[in-house]
Image: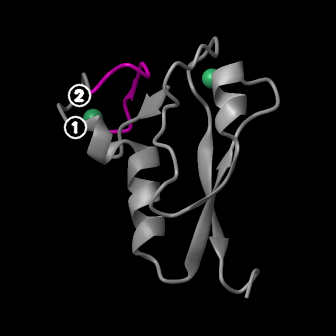
């Protein structure tokens, strides 16, 4: 499931354009926006990809902590979770890991 950051409409993981407002979800989904903010912040050193315990094997396979530039994009490619991909990003801040 993707959420449009412009209008908050939800759409399928496979959607590229928001069906409600026409926003480009590769750039403007809630997860894409949060990833961009984390990449722009100098306090964020690495990004953890958080995967729910009951997520599908494709999602489990990408769980982990990544350098900002190589973190996989969401929704996870090949995700077969029944309600769509629910993975999200969590910033790892320099204060916690000096
Ligand atoms: Zn929208
Ligand atoms: Zn999944």
Q: Can you tell me whether the CB of the residue at mark 2 lies under 8 Å from the nearest atom of ligand 1? A: no
Q: Along the polypeptide, which appears first: circle 2 or circle 1? A: 2
How was the colour assigned to the protein in this rendering?
one colour
Q: Which residue is mark 1?
A: 24
Q: Is residue 62 left or right of residue 17?
A: right
Residue 75 x, y percent position in the rendering? 49, 32
Residue 72 x, y percent position in the rendering? 50, 44
Question: What are the residue bounds of the magenta stretch?
Answer: 6-17
Q: Is residue 9 left or right of residue 72?
A: left
Residue 2 x, y percent position in the rendering? 44, 31
Q: Quadrant of residue 58?
A: top right
Q: Is residue 18 magenta?
A: no
Q: Secondary structure at mark 1?
A: loop
Q: Is residue 14 magenta?
A: yes
Residue positioned 17% across, 31% down in the render? 22
Q: Please say whether residue 50 is visible from this viewpoint.
A: yes
Residue positioned 76% across, 81% down in the render? 96
- Mark 2 in CB contact with mark 1 (< 8 angstroms): yes
Q: CA distance from mark 2 to mark 1?
A: 5 Å
Neighbour tally class for label 1: few under 14, some 14-19, many 20 plus, Cα within 10 Å: some
Q: Secondary structure at mark 2?
A: loop
Q: Which residue is mark 2?
A: 17
Position above or below: 11 against 27: above
């Amino acid at each position: 499931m993707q959420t449009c950051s412009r209008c908050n409409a939800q759409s399928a993981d496979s959607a590229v354009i928001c069906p409600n407002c026409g926003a480009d979800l590769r750039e403007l989904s809630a997860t894409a926006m949060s990833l961009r903010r984390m990449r722009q912040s100098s306090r964020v050193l690495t990004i953890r990809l958080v995967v729910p315990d009951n997520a599908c094997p494709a999602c489990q396979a990408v769980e982990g902590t990544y350098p900002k530039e190589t973190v996989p994009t969401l929704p996870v490619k090949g995700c077969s979770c029944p309600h769509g991909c629910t993975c999200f990003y969590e910033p790892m801040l320099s204060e916690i890991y000096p």
